[in-house]
Amino acid sequence: MAIPRAQSYYFLFFFLAFAIASAQLSPSFYDKSCPGAFRTIRSAVYAAVLKEHRMGASLLRLHFHDCFVNGCDGSVLLDDTPTFTGEKTAAPNNNSIRGFEVIDTIKSNLEAICPQVVSCADILAIAARDSVVALGGPTWTVQLGRRDATTASFSDANSNIPKPTSDLSTLISDFSNKGLSTTDLIALSGAHTIGQARCTTFRTRIYNETSIDTSLATSLQSNCPSTGGDDKLSPLDAFTPNSFDNYYYKNLVNSKGLLHSDQQLYSGGSTDSQVTGYSSNLSKFYADFKAAMINMGNISPLTGTSGEIRKNCRKTN
């Protein structure tokens, strides 16, 4: 029997409305399917950060490195196999990103109460927020409903993640390519108010650049030799490395940015005024950081029936 035209339009409208809705993230996504998700994730994150403050920065960074490679899809968590090379050994990640064991613990705890419900991609998003809060920073409403990728890209990880050696124009372009504004770039860079960096990422700056405070460069050289010692660590913010505050921007204004890419945000260019504003207005930084984290978390998520919900974040089902 033929469906009346008016009725067929109704079905078409309903289908399109459902398709659009299913592609949107929502803060209440797990309210019914796994009401204990937030509590479970927060408990594990707080325990990990209490044990090692640096872990907060590491978990935040995992979310960033995940989202910048083909969207926020949990691909960064996939281990290599004999037939598959993922993102973990790409140059920006190799011997650098960490915190996988914390994600494993969270996933295991969630599987015990809500089997195959909460995605690894959403775990990263929530853990990033909880890490910031654990270190004294702001909270925000995390949008949820991402699904997990069944593949990853070594080559895209090498090319898409912003480099610590990048100049301002390249950084602006890198973020614009992901749909993020220059304001997002500067606000998200404030994540470098916590965590540490490897000697190999800032060696050239402390030995060859003139836009760095002399006393800071000398101090850093004692722990980062001109050759060797690539994995020796120094805090991105030497003053309050375990507090999520605005000292990162205060450092930039005083030529004390650790990475070349950090100092580029305050180098006589178009972003100087925003850096100065954040350096003197913590609440403004917090407000823009929260908005930028939500924007970043919206980069090309898999939703609806795309991807899967992994049982183990390290491997596909």
Image: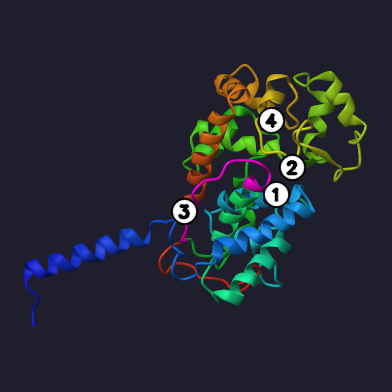
User: Can you give x and y, in whole percent of width and height, for residue 151 in the image?
Assistant: 57, 65
The residues tagged by marks 3 and 4 sit, at their Cα atoms, a distance apart of: 27 Å
| Element type where label 2 sits in the image | loop
Residue 305, relative to residue 69: is it above or below?
Answer: below
Whether tag 2 and tag 1 are in contact, CB under 8 A, the answer is yes
Viewer-nearest residue: 50 or 149 = 50
Check disc 4 and give the amino acid type. Tyr
Image mark for residue 56: 1
Separation of disc 1 and disc 3 at Cα?
20 Å
**Badge 3: few (under 14), some or many (20 or more) residues near its Cα, within 10 Å?**
some
- Counting other residues with Cα less than 10 Å from the Cα at mark 1, is it few (<14), some (14-19), or many (20 or more)? many
Q: Of marks 1 and 4, which one's residue comes earlier in the chain?
A: 1
3 and 4 marks in contact (CB < 8 Å): no
Residue 248 tag number: 4
Q: Along the line of sight, which residue is nearer the eye, 166 or 31? A: 31
Mark sitting on residue 264: none
**Label 2 – label 4 distance at C-alpha:** 11 Å
Name the element at disc 1: helix
Which stretch is magenta? 132-145
- In 3D space, how far apart are the residues under numbered discs 2 and 1 (Cα atoms)? 8 Å
